[in-house]
Amino acid sequence: MSRVQQSARAALGACYRRVAAPFGRRAIGRALADGLPPQLEPVLSSLFPPTPSRRDLAVARIEQRRAALATRSDRYGYVSVSTPQGPSRWAVPMASGDPGQPSVTARWLAQSASVPERWGRVLRACGDAAPRGMFLELGALAGISGAYLALGRGCERLLTIDGSPVCAALAAETLATLDLRAEVVEATFDAALDRLLGGQPPAIERISLAYVDGHHDGGATQYYAGRIAPALSSGGLLLLDDITLNSGMWAAWRALSTGPGWAAAVHLGRLGLLLRDGDAGRPRAFDFSAYTGWWPIGGARQTTTCPSEAQR
C-alpha cells in the first residue's frame, strides 16, 4: 500500500469514527442496561470522547518518545524463531537478518507497529479500570503500549516480556526514559510464564491486568490466555490485541469469549477484553467493533518473513 493510499485510508477511517462516535456512546448506555459491568464503562467511553482528547503531560511524554524513536535511522529484519507454541517472528538488527528479506525502519516500529495514541488511551483506561496490582504484558515491542498501561491507576508494577533482544532493549529504554514502574524481561513467553507462574509458590501469585500482544497465532494466544487466566484477580482484565488480524486469532477470540471463567467479553474492534470471574459460566458478550471501524479479518499469518504490511 502506497503512502497516498495509507493517508486516504486514515482519513476515511477518521471520518467514519467521527460519524459513528455518537452511536457508540448510545450503545454504551444500552450495554449497561443489558448487563455490562459498570467497571468497564470508562474503558468504552475512552473510545468515543465527545470532543478531541487533550494530551496530559504523561501522554505528551509518551508521544514525544514515539516521535524520537521515529527519527532514528536503524533498520530491522525479522527472523523466525521456534517456540513450544510454534514459530514466532522476532525483530533483529538488519545486519543479523537475511539480506534477501525486506526490512522495516525504526519509524515503522514506532508509528505503525506500536499501538497508536488513540488505542494507547484505551489501554490506559483499562489500567484505570483494573484492580490495583501487577500488570503483565506479552510483547514489549518499543515500550509504547507498556508505557500507556503503566499510567493506569491500577498499575503498581508492569512486567513486560519480549523474546527479541532488539525489542526488549527498545522497551527498556522507553520505560526508563519515562521513569515508569516497569521491568522488561527478555525471554520467550513460555519461558517467562514458566518462571513467573510455574513455581511453587509462583513468583507472581496475582495479576490484575494482562495484555497479550505478541505471537499472533490463534493456538498460541489461547494457550497464553489459559496460562494467565488462573492467576488473574477477580475483576482483573485480560486484553488480547489484534483479534481480527487473521482467521486464527479470530477463532481464538471466539473460543475465549464464549468459554467459562469470564463475567464479560467485549469486542472493541482492535482489542478483545475479558473481565475475570472464575465462577462465571458463559460470559455476557458485547460488540462495539461497528462503532470503532475495526472489523476486517486477515488471512493466514506468515511467520518466516518480514510482516507483509511493512514491506514497502
Image (cartoon, helix red, strand yellow):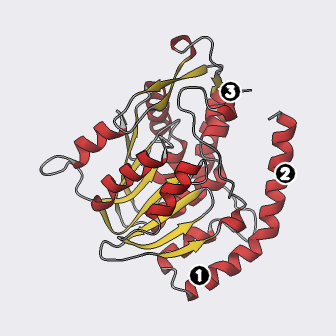
Element type at mark 2 = helix
Mark 2 or mark 3, earlier in chain: 2
Residue 233 percent across, percent down from the top left: 31, 66
Q: Are marks 2 and 1 in contact (CB under 8 Å)?
A: no
User: What is the crowding at mark 3: few (fewer than 14 residues within 10 Å), some, or many (at least 20)?
Assistant: few
Give above or below for 49 relative to 95.
Answer: below
Q: What residue is shown with label 2?
A: 11
Report the Cα–Cα distance between label 3 and label 1: 43 Å
Q: Amino acid at mark 3?
A: Thr
Q: Quadrant of residue 76?
A: top right
**Residue that appears at 54% across and 69% down:** 266
Residue 281 percent across, percent down from the top left: 36, 77
Q: Are marks 2 and 3 in contact (CB under 8 Å)?
A: no
Element type at mark 3 = loop
The mark found on residue 85 in the picture is none
Mark 3 or mark 1, earlier in chain: 1
Which of the two marks, 2 or 1, is nearer to us in this view? Answer: 1
